Amino acid sequence: MASEQKQHPSPNHYDIVIVGAGPVGLMLSTCLARWGYKIKHIDNRPEPTATGRADGIQPRSLDLLRNMGLKSAIMAHKPARVYEVAFWDPPTGGKGIARTGTWASCPDFIDARYPFTTLLHQGLIERAFIADLEKNNTTVQRPWTITGFTSDEQADPEYPVSVELQHVDGTFKESVKAKYLFGGEGARSFVRDQLKIGITHKDPIAYVWGVMDGVVKTDFPDIKMKCTIHSEHGSIMVIPREDNMVRLYIQIASSTDPDFNPRKTATVEEVQASAKRILQPYSIEWERVEWYSVYPIGQGISDKYTLDHRVFLGGDACHTHSPKAGQGMNTAFLDALNLAWKIHAVEGGLAHKSILETYEPERKDVAETLLSFDNKYAKLFSQRPPSSNEVAAATAQKASSGAEENEFIKTFKESCSFTSGYGVAYKANQLNWSPEHPAQSHVIAKSDALVPGRLFRNADVTRVVDANVVHLEQEIPLNGAFRLFVFAGKPSVTGQALKDFAAGLAKKNSFYSAYQRADIDSVSHHERHNPHSKFFTICTVFAAKRNEIEISRDLPALLARYKDNVYADDRWSRNFPDAKAMAHAKMGLDEERGGVVVVRPDGYTGVVVALEEGSATVDALNAYFGAFASKKLGEAQAQL
């Protein structure tokens, strides 16, 4: 967007230089390319990932990919889907292994839209992003590497980062200027090293893992399931994959071993022989091996994600951990998304650059939780097999009435919530309202259902214009805009409040009007999501049946302009069987009086405000956005 409005001084000036075309770099590049930014994106590999590497897409990430319009391209490869995890251990008083339990990969209590893990090799996922980049006139320059950079805002306030690039064979060199530099080159990050940012190792124990992708012939009954297998001969994690493949993770060395060597390796044949011993009494043979690797893993986290909020790190450059929970690629996606929309808000003129300061604490806190979880997860599977009663209780949506959950069940539920991605939460800051936030008003609501810093909840509603039943949380695509969900309750009750709300938005100094599109007079009437502003999209949800709603009658003109985003909250849910308006109830809002939910561009709740007659609702929103907006908002802000 900034690029569309302003020409760069020369062809060698860019909005951002992105180093590394793995999941974190591609997500960042894809978002910013869609929003109109000029990107220099390099990778030191001649081609995208051919085989192997990361392969697990968790439920929250699949939500995100659908919101980006990339889910269908990925699912076209027919990836494996993991709905359950099987637990195998030595039988009591016997030899070999026996199944000791299974549980849902993403149990009902998480309320996921896609309650499964999607398994597909990283290269196919990368190609979906690369194809999208090409549609937006951005390519990954290969094989190129970064050889140096400096960042000096005093010398050049607008393009402070100077970057030196070179073809990997040394035949070509290039010097470019940029507003930002992003290091997403993995654990051996050149950018991190040049910044002299250290890695803190959270767990002194390191491991060497062998990982093998291939097609097997076996009588092991759960080869199509995700399995954790313990035996007297060692341990394996089984991951089903696309095209009849299976991935086996085998730990081949630990720093607790007396002869530990972090450079220890093993041949394909040695790892296969180990797998055969572990799986006894079942047999396994390989028809082919597609990919094999041995690599050391330690729990580490970067001390900083940035030094000057011009040069940033993300993905494996910031955090390393075991592959057990399949979090690497998913965490990388959310690192990139978090940074992308904040850069967009700053460079587009919506927000003060101080919001860039929230990237590190939000994402580093998640990485700290991941490393702590990774350690706990390992112990969960190694201390003892759970009883069948524990498995049933852990998998159930609710614990038995009055029954106290034991440590295994508590850990299981925490684990499922975190691995799915739905358990990721951000702490209070200017973006996530709290009682300490500058915005203070009697209309700001406190709800257990919608907590600022946590994901907006999913809900089915009926779109009024065409009677389609849709997923409300997916109706606004990932467009870099804040999402205003106006839960309008009953039209007969909230009619005046809606008129007052629209009148408040229309005021020149409101958060909404202050960032009106410069080209608003030429916007097509087909524009569904951003007719007024690039930074705000509105959805209105009535607690009424579709045939009772008349958009032109029930909504003031400003809100009616979003006619394709008007919905009837008339769907039934087994989780809210007595609710007359399920989506309202699910969000913890009054079914008659509703409320306004501000959702950040990345899908996390920012603030919840009551929908009241008068100016209080918009005044409160002006105060919320005023905490980070680039302009002074609202007449009544000082009076709140």
Image (cartoon, rainbow, N blue to C red):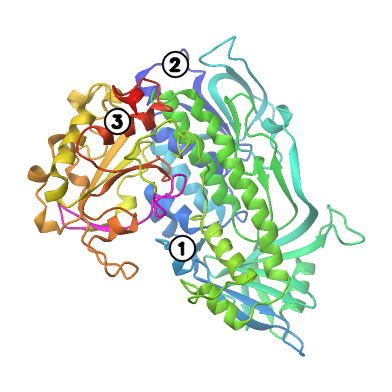
Work out which quarter of the rendered image holds the N terminus and state it: top left
Work out which quarter of the rendered image holds the C terminus and state it: top left
Q: Nearer the viewer, mark 2 or mark 1?
A: 1
* Location of residue 617 in the rendering, given as x and y in whole percent from the top left corner: 27, 36
* Location of residue 363 in the rendering, given as x and y in whole percent from the top left corner: 57, 41
Q: Main secondary structure of the magenta part?
A: loop
Q: CA distance from mark 1 to mark 3?
A: 34 Å
Q: Which circle's residue, 1 or 3, is located before the other in the chain?
A: 1
Magenta highlight on residue 127: no
- Tell whether 410 sits left or right of 533: right
* Location of residue 318 in the rendering, given as x and y in whole percent from the top left corner: 65, 41
Is residue 155 among what the camera can see?
Answer: yes
Establish if 620 lies above or below 545.
Answer: above
Q: Nearer the viewer, mark 1 or mark 3?
A: 3
Q: Which circle's residue, 2 or 3, is located before the other in the chain?
A: 2
Q: Amino acid at mark 1?
A: Ile
Check disc 2 and report the residue beneath it: 8
Check disc 1 and report the residue beneath it: 110
Between residue 507 and residue 366, name the one nearer to us: 507
Q: Which circle's residue, 2 or 1, is located before the other in the chain?
A: 2
Q: CA distance from mark 2 to mark 1?
A: 46 Å
Q: Amino acid at mark 2?
A: His
Q: CA distance from mark 2 to mark 3?
A: 37 Å
Check disc 3 and report the residue beneath it: 619
Q: Quadrant of residue 484?
A: top left
Q: Amino acid at mark 3?
A: Asp
Element carrying mark 2: loop
* Location of residue 164 in the rendering, given as x and y in whole percent from the top left corner: 64, 22
Q: Look at 58% across and 62% down and name the residue there.
A: 415
Tell me which segment is drawn in magenta. 447-468
